Image (tube, rainbow, N blue to C red):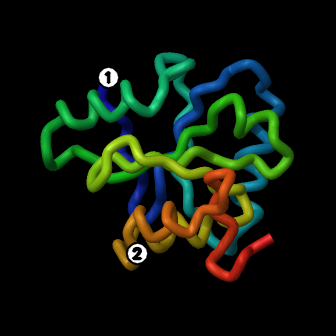
């Protein structure tokens, strides 16, 4: 199941939890409100229901090299339930399967830097706190 391609200079936000349509609307609203520009290409397709990062990595590795994406963000059950809507960032390229959480308010910073290759996935993952959540480089909050 190949992954959809994100729009130019955006990151793929893939919905994997379909239990609450209102929560999905809230996630998208929070992500969009966090930045001045659009940073996300949202995909809400039932074929991705319950799919985890490892299955998506396997599919992406099998895709044509020109169609591969290097990272994505999952809107999973934890994203839907937490008021900060922390998306699960998944590395698909350098360290496939490496993850960290990024609350909606920090999504534009992460997405913009990853989409233009200004920073690497590992730089954000390494800056995540003890819970595995990126909250900015200065301790965020």
Q: Provide residue 92's location: percent of width, then percent of height.
A: 33, 46
Residue 62 in which image quadrant:
top left
The quadrant in which the C terminus is found is: bottom right
Tag 1, which secondary structure? loop
> Which is in the foreground here, disc 1 or disc 2?
2
Q: Which of the two residues, 129 or 26, is positioned nearer the viewer here?
A: 129
The answer to which quarter of the image holds residue 31 is bottom right
Sequence-wise, the earlier of marks 1 and 2 is 1
Q: Is 26 on the left-hand or right-hand side of 126?
A: right
Q: Which residue occupies 52% across, 46% down? A: 73
Rendered view: 55 above or below 85 = above
Residue 102 in percent (x, y) is at 64, 56
Q: In the rendering, at what x and y percent does residue 137 appear?
A: 62, 78
Residue visible at 75% across and 35% down in the picture: 80
Q: Secondary structure at mark 2?
A: loop
| Residue 54 picture location, percent across and down | 38, 30
Numbered badge on residue 1: 1
Instruction: Name the foreground residue: 45 vs 107.
Output: 107
Label 2, on which residue? 119
């Amino acid at each position: 199941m190949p992954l959809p391609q994100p729009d130019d200079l955006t990151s793929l936000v893939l919905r994997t939890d379909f239990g609450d349509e209102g929560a999905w609307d809230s996630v998208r609203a929070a992500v969009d409100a966090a930045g001045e520009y659009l940073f996300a290409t949202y995909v809400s397709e039932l074929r991705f229901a319950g799919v985890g990062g490892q299955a998506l990595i396997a599919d992406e590795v099998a895709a044509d090299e020109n169609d591969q994406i290097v990272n994505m963000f999952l809107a999973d059950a934890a994203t839907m339930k937490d008021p900060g809507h922390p998306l699960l960032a998944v590395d698909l390229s350098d360290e496939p399967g490496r993850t960290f959480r990024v609350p909606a308010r920090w999504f534009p910073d992460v997405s913009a830097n990853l989409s233009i290759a200004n920073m690497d996935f590992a730089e954000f993952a390494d800056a995540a706190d003890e819970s595995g959540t990126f909250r900015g480089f200065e301790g965020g909050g």
